[in-house]
Image: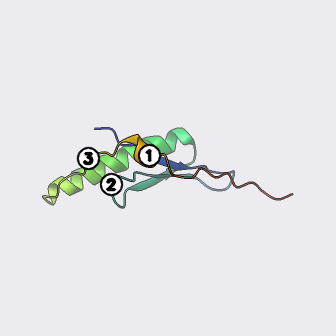
């Protein structure tokens, strides 16, 4: 199953942060956007494996419209 991810843009000194909001506590990061997305896939798979090993149910993904209200903010450097 594919889950939506939320990405926090990285900078020259910080990594891209990634959260899988449908899987509580599931997050990751990567130095590039591609690395962050791959790391998120690995984190989600590990989260699901751990949940199943503990006999927990895996939450269904939410429709994308659930995330339509999330604000997208760009924070720039002041000159």
Q: Dot 3 lies on which element?
A: loop
Is 31 on the left or on the right of 50, as rendered? right
Classify the position of the N terminus by image quarter. Answer: top left
Q: Which residue is mark 3?
A: 60
Q: Which residue is mark 2?
A: 23
Towards the viewer: 78 or 12: 78
Sequence-first disc among 1 and 3: 1
Crowd around label 1: few <14 · some 14–19 · many ≥20 (10 Å)? some
CB contact under 8 Å: marks 3 and 2: no
Between label 1 and label 3, give the one nearer the viewer: 3
Crowd around label 2: few <14 · some 14–19 · many ≥20 (10 Å)? some
Residue at the spot 52% in from the left edge and 38% down from the top edge: 34
Is 46 on the left or on the right of 78, as rendered? left
Image quadrant where residue 32 sits: top right
Towards the viewer: 27 or 70: 70
Sequence-first disc among 3 and 2: 2
CB contact under 8 Å: marks 1 and 2: no
The single residue placed furthest to the left in the displayed view is 55
User: Residue 78, how many percent across, how many down?
Assistant: 82, 59
Q: Which mark is residue 5?
A: 1
Classify the position of the C terminus by image quarter. Answer: bottom right
Compute the Cα span from label 1 to label 3. Answer: 14 Å
Sequence-first disc among 1 and 2: 1
């Amino acid at each position: 199953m594919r889950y939506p991810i939320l990405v926090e843009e990285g900078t020259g000194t910080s990594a891209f942060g990634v959260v899988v909001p449908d899987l509580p506590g599931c997050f990751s990061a990567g130095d590039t956007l591609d690395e962050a997305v791959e790391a998120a896939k690995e984190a989600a798979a590990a989260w699901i494996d751990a949940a199943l090993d503990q006999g927990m149910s895996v939450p269904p993904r939410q429709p994308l419209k659930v995330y339509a209200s999330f604000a997208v903010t760009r924070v720039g450097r002041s000159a």
